[in-house]
Image (cartoon, rainbow, N blue to C red):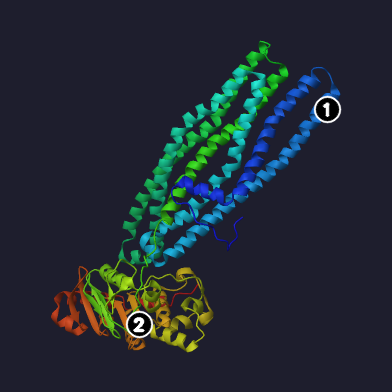
Amino acid sequence: MIDAYEDPGTPDCRGGARYLWWLVKQQAARSALGSLISCVWMVLLAATPYLLSRAIDEGLQPGDYPTLATWTATLFAVGVFNAWLSIMRHRTMTRVRMDANFRTVKVVIAHAVRLGAALPRRVGAGEVVTIGVGDVNTIASSLTVIGPGVGAIAAYLVVAGLLVSVSLPIAAVVLLGMPLMAVIVGPLLRRLQDTETEYRERQGVLTARIADLAGGLRVLNGLGGKGLIADAFHRDSQRLRAQGYRVGSVTSWVQAIGVGLPTLFLAVVTWLAARLAAQGSITVGELVSVYGYVTVLVRPVSYFVDWGYEVSRGVVAARRVIRFLNLEPLPDHGTEDAPAEPAALHDPESGVRVSPGRLTALAGDRPGDATAVVDRLGRYAPTAVTWGGIPLDKIPLAQVRARILVADHEADLFAGRLRELLGERDDELAVREALRAAVAEDVVQGLPDGLDSPIDAQGRNLSGGQRQRVRLARALLADPEVLLAVEPTSALDAHTEARVAQRLRAAREGRTTVVTTTSPLVLDHADTVHYLVEGKVAATGSHRELLAGEPGYRALVARDAGEAEDEDDTEEAASKEVVR
């Protein structure tokens, strides 16, 4: 089975079936062993009726009891050996399944790491969750049919060969039965793939909605939008349920055929063998053997149907994994070095110019426009930004990431000690200064073990304002040459926000800082404010200059000031929440 640190290999992303075949080839020896064991196991199952017929014809009917005892002992030995083979077959195929599971997980995680910051911009959280929870297991389960599938073919051919020595008509019926079943089941399997694909797509959408709700339920409740979102979620879940019923309908037919057709097949062959025995064309022992052969064939035939069902579902799941693996990370073709000294950033698409060593604020009539500018300035989106006159996309990405930091107000917080979450540093003074600049000292004081207190994933045991200040402290502790902060104070009350704005300016004195905000408390501390209208710079100046000369800007920040007064006590109340 694949080791935790072993290279999983390069997957074949040319199609769902090719991906499954790649998983088989990655463990070719184990897959071959499982197939071999399954073949022997299935053939020995088919040998049981043959041994039974010999015991009847050569021992029981003539009354030769020593011969009967010999055949009986042989039958018992074959049964014991086959039971052991069954155990080994199951163990081997379990290893095949687990290897496929872990290998796919490693491939998906490695690609997610490769995508990096491009991941949330290229695929929704719901899609990733659906792949990790459902598709990986479906792919792994589909490979467990390798051994039984190959063994079923071997048993089918052996039984057909044995039946030739008994009766050609019966052998012909057996040989023609499998193609007939393939003709019947084939269209159903194609329909199953279509319905399963649509179901997986809807499941991904609904999972994404659940993830969004989990992160923003408190905000939605405060805005009075919980009912609206709940109605939309109800409609999506109803559509998913209806699609699930369609998948279940097709699945039920496939499984019913998997049980019904082999039984019907058994009845036809048994009736034909009984007529031949009544006519004297075959002996009683041969009649018993035919019945035994066909009974044994029920299992291989069922495996054929199950094989088609599982592989169809595996192909659908593999296609989703491939679609994820085909996502490309941000291109990095940079060959020019970044400016040796602090330099201006210019975004020609919006007209924003960020002067080095100054605090610049972006206030947009639509918050998404300011965030889009930051994405371009930080090279998290296709960009025409220049840095000191050098196109940003011509600079190696490693140099950009080392000197320009985008601090998103919804950036992930991983579980662990608060000290680790901030970015563990030996310089205790630097940590304390970053916490003070972010006005996050009370967060540390309110935790039982201070900086060594455990923090839940995404900071669930902190309030919204506390999480935001911790994120800001982490960004300040990184001390980048250029800091691009997206709405760093949006979850804070007016009093705390004013202190953060003042301390942020002092902490970043002489270094380039950009914040997106419409809060007058923050804007008043900025050296330069760019007022964006429909994503373009409509006016530039200080906060007070724009208040005096730009009516649209004045209306934008006045509205935000009114909202801040209404929510003045929000952070104080949130900071008193019990840390669970």
Q: Is residue 120 above or below residue 234?
A: below
Number of other residues with Cα within 10 Å of mark 2, as a class: few under 14, some 14 to 19, many 20 or more: many
Q: Residue at the far top: name it.
A: 279
Describe the element under mark 1 as helix, strand or loop. Answer: helix
Number of other residues with Cα within 10 Å of mark 1, as a class: few under 14, some 14 to 19, many 20 or more: some
Describe the element under mark 2 as helix, strand or loop. Answer: helix
In percent of the image, x 67 and y 26: which residue is there?
292
Residue 362 — which label? none
Query: Spatial distance from mark 2 to mark 1, Cα to Cα?
Result: 93 Å
Asked whether the viewer can see residue 463, the reply is yes
Tell me the residue that label 1 is attached to: 69
Task: Between label 2 and label 1, give the one nearer the viewer.
Answer: 1
Q: Is residue 62 above or below residue 312?
A: above
Counting from the top left corner in percent of width and height, residue 349 is at: 22, 70
Callout 1, which amino acid? Ala
Counting from the top left corner in percent of width and height, residue 448 is at: 53, 80
Q: Is 68 or 337 nearer to us in this picture?
A: 337
Counting from the top left corner in percent of width and height, residue 88 is at: 68, 45
In percent of the image, x 31 and y 73: which residue is there?
392
Quarter of the image that includes the N terminus: bottom right
Callout 2, which amino acid? Thr
Tell me the residue that label 2 is attached to: 496
Counting from the top left corner in percent of width and height, residue 564 is at: 28, 77
